[in-house]
Image: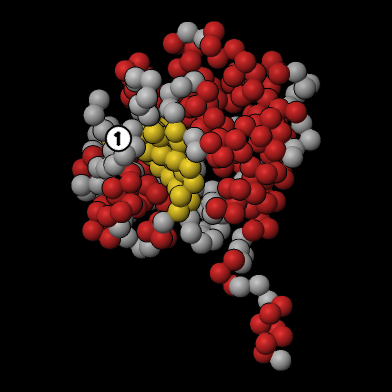
Amino acid sequence: LYERSHISSPPIDYFDVFKESKEQNFYESQESVIALCTYLQQLIKTIEDLDENQLKDEFFKLLQISLWRNKCDLSLSGGESSSQKTDVLNSLEDLKPFILLNDMEHLWSLLSNCKKTREKVSVTRVYIVLDNSGFELVTDLILANFLLSSELATKVHFYGKTIPWFVSDTTIHDFNWLIEQVKHGNHKWMSKCGADWEEYVKMGQWVYHDHIFWTLPHEFCAMPQVAPDLYAELQKAHLILFKGDLNYRKLTGDRKWEFSVPFHQALNGFHPAPLCTIRTLKAEIQVGLKPGQGEQLMASEPCWWTSGKYGIFEYDGPL
């Protein structure tokens, strides 16, 4: 009896209790996925004609879409690519006042500098430490696609979780499944994105990694001692983007910092490479604000730092 039941049950280490909700999130976001893929493909067609400022604007838009994710109104209106473009832009303009810290300019100057000084053989590596699967992962892949198409990066490394984690965190299964779904989407620009993404993986321009450290209880400043192999890997990056709230909490050690403490100080010695956190605020921790800014928000909106209403791009690295 034991043998029979043992054979018919899949191994528990492959079981993802959150799989259904992650996949549902993707299916429910189909219109937004199509709008975003269409926007990207139209952009790629003209990317070589864009001047530096236009390219920077597009980079900033895709960064903001990766920040706000489902808050962006990416719905299709009328099916014309121009109307989709307006939707995307309008929603981003409306959300701009809620970005409390905006270090996007630092990211642009860092990557555009790498591009200008890059010799033919050298590489610019951007690492993205992922958060949620579903639509958020689509926005991250769209951003990664743009980084390659604009030549702001030549290689993008993604870090996900080794096991199902915190409901919707990305695993290798989610990463591969999502690319497959986009590739088989019933819209030409959506399936074009999926086919391109599959090719990037095959060619080694996109590399997915996981490491047990990301699901251990340590703050990130312990990484050089606990996971020196991972820290050494991160040191190869030209820029690391940390997505989401939990990564921010681990970057700052989840301590009760004063709001105006510099981000560099709160990182507590964790400086593998230039890094930026992309996060909507959903936990009671925030550093790097102007003196009095946090207290002012607290007085007018006691839930400002947990409601997800505000977002940040917070950079640490050479300027």
Q: Residue at x 65, y 49 (%)?
A: 177
Disc 1 target residue: 274
Residue 149, placed above or below residue 158: above
Residue nearest the viewer, comparing 179 with 67? 179
Q: Residue at x 50, y 38 (%)?
A: 204
Badge 1 marks a residue whose secondary structure is: loop
The C terminus sits in image quarter: top left
Judged left or right of residue 124, residue 42 is right
Where is residue 249? Give x, y as percent. Answer: 36, 51
Q: Is residue 318 visible?
A: yes
Q: How many marks?
A: 1
To which quarter of the image does residue 312 belong? Answer: top left
Q: Residue at x 69, y 30 (%)?
A: 192
Judged left or right of residue 251, residue 12 is right
Where is residue 108? Give x, y as percent. Answer: 38, 22
Residue 101, placed above or below residue 29: above
Judged left or right of residue 191, residue 141 is left
Check disc 1 and give the amino acid type. Pro
Most extreme residue toward the bottom is 1
Where is residue 123? Give x, y as percent. Answer: 37, 29
Residue nearest the viewer, comparing 8 with 220? 8
Q: Residue at x 30, y 54 (%)?
A: 229
Most extreme residue toward the front is 121
